[in-house]
Image (cartoon, rainbow, N blue to C red):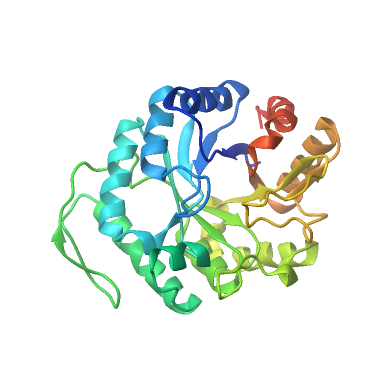
Amino acid sequence: MRRIRFGAVVREAGSGKAWAEKARRLEGAGFDVLLVPDHLVGPRFAPIAALTAAACATSRLRVGTLVFANDFRHPAVLAKETATLDVLSGGRLEVGIGTGWMAGDYTGAGLALEPPGVRIERLREALAVLKGLWGEEPFRFEGRHYRISGLDQRPKPLQRPGPPLVIGAGGARMLRLAAEEADVVNIGMRVKPDGSGPDPRDGGLPALLAKLAAVREAAGERYARLELGTSVIQAGERKAEEAWSAADSAALDETPQVLLGTRHDIADKIRHWRDEHDVSYFVLHHERDLDTFEPVVEDLATG
């Protein structure tokens, strides 16, 4: 039976001390992972510096991204940064990665938001580069988007063959890529091609169940080694959506992304999704729900 894991997305703090206190709160409450997003706009810390500080403030808590936007960095740069962070954290890093999608990031920075197919193809190449550069030998790669000429980076990650890869996926092509390449698949809503936000037609229980089935089919023999997760957008009592967030829970009732009720109700729902559908990694999307979720983590900390 898969062990239940809990993560929480933390975006910013008023000082280094306050950020360290947030990390220690998660560790003390029994959370497994502190996660930061990767956007150029909005109230969010930059990932590498924030994760380094969180790792240095804790001893057990894993740190990771949900998720790096591949378009923001060359994968050779990301491979170097993540290998360093894995060493500095004592092997506690999880590398979440996606294509990049939010139109405001691209427009504000003057970046071209290319069609989804191009971004997914580029991400597939980037994954090959990351894995190759984390390896022991000099790495060569010739792709459409990236070329690596015998590069041998040091340090290598402590975790071998590399930190776990988490891929966020909602659309069919991303689900297939995640099933084939990731260690963890974080299942969410499909994003509109223009980057304006999640596609509201993609919500609800039937859509989620279809995505789980698609991952199982695409993964084949890999499925037994995959960890399936999702983000919890609403917990306890339903609250208004945050104005700065692209998350929209309106179409997500009956899914594990909306967990309403008492601590025992939520714990029962989480066990159901683990036992019946293999979803075992639950990421709290909003810090505002920490008080609600901490007792649930306590109840289920032993899995």
The image quadrant where one finds the N terminus is: top right
- For residue 202, side relative to residue 46 (left or right): right
- For residue 104, side relative to residue 109 (left or right): right
Image position, residue 177 (x, y; %):
49, 67
**Compared with residue 13, is residue 96 higher up or lower down, i.e. above or below?**
below
The image quadrant where one finds the C terminus is: top right
- For residue 212, side relative to residue 219 (left or right): right
**Compared with residue 224, is residue 213 higher up or lower down, i.e. above or below?**
below
- For residue 110, side relative to residue 247 (left or right): left
Q: Residue at x 17, y 53 (%)?
A: 137
Image position, residue 221 (x, y; %):
53, 61
**Compared with residue 113, is residue 104 higher up or lower down, i.e. above or below?**
above
Seen from the viewer's position, the closer of residues 192 and 136 is: 192
Seen from the viewer's position, the closer of residues 284 and 244 is: 244
Q: Is residue 99 visible?
A: no
Q: Quadrant of residue 130?
A: bottom left
Image position, residue 279 (x, y; %):
67, 49
Q: Is residue 83 visible?
A: yes
